[in-house]
Image (cartoon, rainbow, N blue to C red):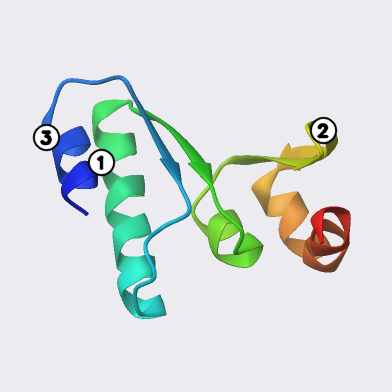
């Protein structure tokens, strides 16, 4: 979480995060909400690598699903929310 605070307090234009810490789901949702808000306010790009597909799609504009380094699915998050099972099958 310190890394997140530093990134949001600095003047970076892009923030990358791989798998959020193992926190209570309500805290993770709150963190993602804060990141989303900061990204919109500061025109900040965010790259989130996350295994919890449904959660990530709720806070993103676009998503890319990789399997063994190959793109198997990509699109607008709003469209992909309806395909969560397909996405899970693609990488599990």
Q: Badge 2: few (under 14), some or many (20 or more) residues near its Cα, within 10 Å?
A: few
Q: Which residue is mark 2?
A: 71
40 on left or right of 80: left
What numbered label is drawn on residue 38? Answer: 1
2 on left or right of 34: left
Q: Which residue is mark 3?
A: 9
In the rendered image, residue 91, in percent from the top left (x then y), is placed at: 81, 54
- Please tell me whether mark 2 sits on a helix, a strand or a loop: strand
In the picture, residue 86 is in which quadrant? bottom right
Question: Residue at point 32% right, 36% down?
Answer: 39
79 on left or right of 78: right
Q: Are marks 3 and 1 in contact (CB under 8 Å)?
A: no
Q: Badge 3: few (under 14), some or many (20 or more) residues near its Cα, within 10 Å?
A: few
Give the label, 3 or 1, closer to the camera. 3
Going from N to C along the chain, the mark reached first, 2 or 1, is 1
Work out which residue is located at the far front of the displayed protein and give it.
68
In the rendered image, residue 69, in percent from the top left (x then y), is placed at: 78, 32
What numbered label is drawn on residue 92? Answer: none
Going from N to C along the chain, the mark reached first, 3 or 2, is 3
Question: Residue at point 49% right, 43% down?
Answer: 48
Give the label, 2 or 1, closer to the camera. 2
Going from N to C along the chain, the mark reached first, 3 or 1, is 3
Q: Badge 1: few (under 14), some or many (20 or more) residues near its Cα, within 10 Å?
A: some
| Measured Cα–Cα span from mark 3 to mark 2 | 32 Å
In the rendered image, residue 83, in percent from the top left (x then y), is placed at: 83, 61
Location of the C terminus (image quadrant): bottom right
In the picture, residue 75 is in which quadrant? top right
Location of the N terminus (image quadrant): bottom left
Q: Are marks 2 and 1 in contact (CB under 8 Å)?
A: no
| Measured Cα–Cα span from mark 3 to mark 1 | 10 Å
| Measured Cα–Cα span from mark 2 to mark 1 | 28 Å
């Amino acid at each position: 979480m310190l890394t997140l605070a530093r990134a949001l307090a600095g003047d970076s234009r892009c923030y990358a995060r791989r798998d959020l810490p193992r926190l209570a789901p309500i805290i993770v949702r709150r963190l993602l909400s804060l990141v989303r808000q900061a990204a919109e306010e500061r025109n900040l790009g965010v790259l989130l690598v996350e295994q919890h597909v449904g959660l990530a799609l709720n806070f993103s504009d676009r998503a890319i699903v990789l399997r063994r380094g190959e793109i198997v699915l990509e699109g607008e998050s709003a469209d992909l929310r309806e395909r969560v099972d397909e996405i899970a099958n693609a990488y599990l």
